[in-house]
Structure formats: structure tokens, C-alpha cells
Amino acid sequence: MERIVIVGGVAAGATAAAKARRLSPNAKIVMVESGPDISFANCGLPYYIGGDIKSRSKLILQSPESFNTQYGVEVYTHTLVSSIDRDAHILKTIDSRSGETKEIPYTKLILAQGGRPIKPTISGADNDHVFTLWTLEDMDKISNFLEEKKPKNAVVVGGGFIGLEMVEALVKRGLNVDVVEMMPHVMSVMEAEIAGFIERELHSYNVGVYTGTGVTKIRSNKVKLDNGKKLDADMVLLSIGVRPTLKLAIDAGLEIGEAGGLLVNEYLQTSDPDIYAAGDMVEIEHRVNGNKVRIPLAGPANRQGRIAAENALGGNHAYKGSIGTSVVRVFEAVAGTTGLSLKQARALGIDADAVVVHKEHHTSYYPGSELVSVLLVYDRNTKVILGGQTAGYKGADKRLDVIATATAAKLKITDISDVDFAYSPPIGTANDALNMASYVAENKISGYSPSITVAELDSFIADRKHLFIDVRNVFAFEKSHVKGAIHIPLELLKQNMKSIPSDKHIIVYDEIGKEGHQALRTLIGAGFKNVTNISGGHTSLQRFAIINTGFQNIEIDILPIENKSISEEIIQKEEKKEDKPKDQNSTIIVDVRTAGEFYSGAFPNAVNIPLDDIMANNGDLGSDMNREIIVYCASGARSAYAQQVLKQRGYNNVKNGGGIAAMMSRR
């Protein structure tokens, strides 16, 4: 009879045990776990601390008793495996509570010991107010400390997934929180501009962000950084990474791989054919480049546990590897990554490139629309998608899953161009952000629309005689722009061609990249040879500029951070109403944009009567039907419609002023 013994529970181990029982109703299955819990939702721990999950019991997926009842698995908790006798196929164990020793025979062994948080050798790291978070016991210690000691200031060391989730949790518990990260920005696995989106969200909740620095000392109420700065901290959370649990495997003589994890083949078999392994302790193949990597994530661990159990019982299921898809939500901001970043791809010698698109997650005219950002990485020669990243308040996870699927399937950017993504005004757009990203990439490869990411901008301009042209409206330009850029709104570009020098490399940008593309095509059509659009426009410029390193060769003002609060009440503010225009003979200038657009910047002395109100015959324009009325909007489209409506209503002297840029140029 087969005796399947599994060392370790949680994601890989518990999944392996359940799969083994489903495959074999007669096998003897034993699980040995060093801790008290065999199956719990460790990804949910920060959310219990933060109060999003109210019931601790919901985190316990299986108990030893329920696992035995449901699957017929013999479970030993609080049990350490002291050694593996590979020749005799025996585990030697010791109960950490009673000291009792026991030998457990196996025909096939599955190691699923996972990893443990790295605890750095920092002075004070062992103090009672310093924590790590990995198990239910860790969670309980933190929760009890928060309840009993009521700390006011916390420092989270490490700006990765768990670290940032704990930042949010502690802010929700009412603490003042700082996060310290050695790398130039939080979420170091992500591109700088995607991380900049997350950092801006942290700043908006008054979280202190200290990047490019490390902790040197921890004291009872202070943390000292290597730059000399001291932070208030009566609580510290260490979240700087995970180290695989390998002592048992090393002592047993199993081979360790080049990435520092337990080496397994495609069938998750170790160097001993009767020992399999899964989860955070193993190193696996990256599906994009074939390199050996360690990816300590719950999703891969669960899938590896299933496959290890299947193969231990005689199966022939090859694990295809992982692409490292991961996503984080920090307050309301969501960002994720999959496959290779542009930097990783180029470091591997791949002729890789990337584009960035910011687009509404559903149609802009349906309420609640938010920008979602897509950064797509691809091989310039083959057009194969290598990975990508997404960010936004809504819809980022949906786009990330599509990029992950495309990366795993080795699809080309041309394969994404014509995919029919789900569309309805409340759900998506007729051309999704992913469609648009593939169009932009195709245009870049063909040379039709050259573009550059903000991360490449410093080096791009270092050896070029260049000129920045900002094609946004005047109000956006006045709030923030690249220092030295000349301002020519898109709709005025053609008539200002003669003022643009032809001996410089022209770098155009708008708010999100779309109008920058239009400006580029206009300039190229007029004979300009060297023109490049900034991929992602001013939005990407802002996100990159906010990180610690930022730009070295350009200057740009950071837009004010919006102040947000966990406890603030949502107040419905009444829209400010302008006085109705008086019945007089003077010319009246009417802004037919929405109130929100109007208050972001308008022509001097204009009155705001949105197009919807004009169509509903609201808004007093006076009784003089010959009075001169000038209507304008953002681009001239809505104002043209307003002109028609007013003429039909009997006003004889209505002129379309066009877009805001054209109006402002007439001041």
C-alpha cells in the first residue's frame, strides 16, 4: 500500500494531501506540521488585523480533526521532522510539546515546508514591539499588542506585498505609519511609474514613505535609518522577504538549485526520485525565459501541491512553471505585475520594449469612470508579449489577468489587437485599454508613432539636442509641466508650426499619450523628421517623478497630493451654481462643458451652462435674440451642437468659439 507522507501544511501541503486522497481512496496519507495549524488563509492575515475580516475563524480553512474526517488524513501538528532516512524511507520526528519521538515510514514523501520571513540582524530586532507576519500565531501577537499596548506610531520595514498590506491595516487601526524600503521605490518588482501610482496613494493617506534607505537600529520608541533620520515607532513590522525552509532537505542531501531553493524537475521531483516538493521552498522554471526562480506566492504553491501529489501516486503531470503574476491593493489603489519587466527582459539580452496606456476602465460618459493603466512589455523582433503591469482604482486586475494569459500562451501583440473584450458602458469600452496598448506597440514597432517610456527619458535626452512640446490645455500646463517645454495646445499646433525649430529632436506629450500621438503625426506630416511621443504622457511623468530617484535630467512640478482619510465621511457637495447671466446687450461667453470641467479652468468671465442644460432649455441667456453669444467646450464638438440648438431656439448671433485652447489663444 502506498504511504504518502507530507511535511508541511497550508497552501502546498494541504492541497497535496487533499488531492492525494481524491486520487487514491486506499493510500495511507500522513501530514506532519511543525506549527499548530495545517490549513489557514495566510493571505488574509493583514485584512483581519485591519478589520476588513471580522471573524478569525474564517481564516481557518481546515483543522486536523476536520481534515481527518473529510479526507482520512492522519495529521500530526506541533511535530518537527528531525531527519529523513532516505535509504529506509523513514522520517524521524519529535513532538515539540511533549518531546515524544516517532518514526513515520513512507513510500513517497512530499516536502512542503514553505519559507519563513527574513529577520535581519538589526540592533533591536528582537524587541517585544517588533513583529513579523506569516502565521496565525504572528497575527494574534500583533492583534493582542494593538489591543493591549495601543501604539500610536508604527514603522513597516519593507515595501513589498505584505508590508504595504500591513501599512493599510495599521492605518485602519488608527496608527501613524511610515514605510521604509531599501530599493528606490516601494514594490520593487514593478516599474517605477507603476510604483509611483502606489506611492502617491500612500502619501494621500499621510503615510511616510522612505525609500533608498534602510534601518540600522530599533529602539523602544524610535527607528534609526542609515541616512541618520529617526522615525517614531512604538511598533515595528519587519517584512523584507521570505527565505525557504531548507535545513531538513539539506541535511538529507537533496540538491539545492542555483536560485537558492530546493531543486526539482518538471514533475516536482527532487534529486531523490521518491521525494517530491512544492511551494515556497522550491525553485521552478520561469515560463517566459526558462530561468530557475523562486516565486513565493499562494497560487503557484497550490497548483504545485496538486501536481506533486498526482506524480507521487504514479502520475506524469509536468509543471509548466510560473510567470509570477501578483497584485496588491493599497487603500483604494490596485497595481499588479506578470511575466518580465522591461528591465528584466533587457538584462536577459532580449530586444524588448514597452508601451504605456492610460484609459477609462469603462466609458467616460457612464458615471464612475476611472483611468486604468496598462504597461505592456514585448519582444521587438518576434512581437511576443513578455509580461506587463497594470494600475488603477478600478479594472486593473481584469487587465492584468489578460496579460498573464497572453504571456503564458506566448501570444503576440497583434493577437491582442483584435480581441473582443467584454463591453457595455458600465463595464468596459469599445476599444479596451489592452486593445489600445497593442495598437500603440504596433505603431511603435512600425515606426509610425515612435514613443518612449518615462523610465527611459533621462538617458534618451542626455545626448540629444531636444525640445519638449506640451500639447495640453493652458490650465493643465500652468499646474505642472516639464521645465523648458513650450506650450502649444493640440488644436493650435498646425498654425504654430513655423515657431518650432527643425534642428532639434521634438518630444511631445499630452495628459495620457493619445493626443501626443496625434501631435506627433501632425508634425511628421509637416516634414519634421525626429519626433517622439512620451508613452503615457503627463500622467506617467507625474508617477515617475514622485519616486525617490525620479528624473535626473528634467524638472517637473509634482501635482498636489489629495488628502484622504480612512474615517472621513463621504459628503455630497452641492455643485457651485453661477449666477444666471443678466439680460443685457453685451457679448456673453458660455462654457458648455460640465461643472467639473468648468471649475478645473475656464475662459475669464465665462458662465457655465452645460450642454445638457442648454438642450433642456435651462439657463437664462436673456431676451435679446440678436445678442452675440459665443459658446465653447473642450474641443469644439459640444459647442457646435450647442450652437445648433440655440439657433433653432431663435438666437441669431451664436458663434462657436471651439475648444478651450482656441478660446484662450484669443485673450
Image: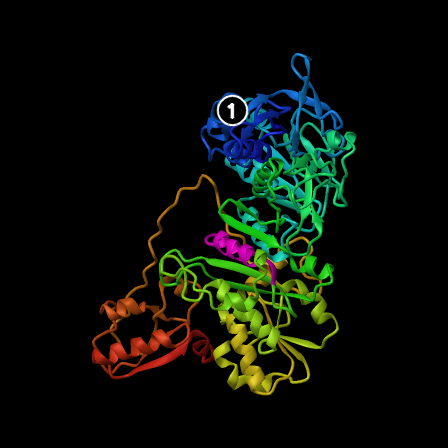
Q: How far from the left and from the top, in percent, is residue 598?
A: 39, 65
Question: Foreground residue, 589 or 184?
Answer: 184
Q: Which image quadrant: the C terminus?
A: bottom left
Q: Is residue 233 visible?
A: no
Residue drawn 47% across and 79% down? Answer: 491
Residue at (61% x, 28% y) in the render? 2
In the picture provided, is 632 more to the left or to the right than 466? left
| Highlighted magenta segment, given as a residue range | 385-406
Nearer-the-camera pick, 366 or 572: 366
In magenta stretch: residue 389: yes
Residue beneath disc 1: 72
165 or 603, which is in the foreground?
165
Q: Is residue 491 above or below residue 192?
A: below
Image side of residue 106 versus residue 605, left or right: right
Q: Secondary structure at mark 1?
A: loop
Q: What color scheme is it?
A: rainbow
Pick out the residue farthest to the front. Answer: 1
Q: Amino acid at mark 1?
A: Gly
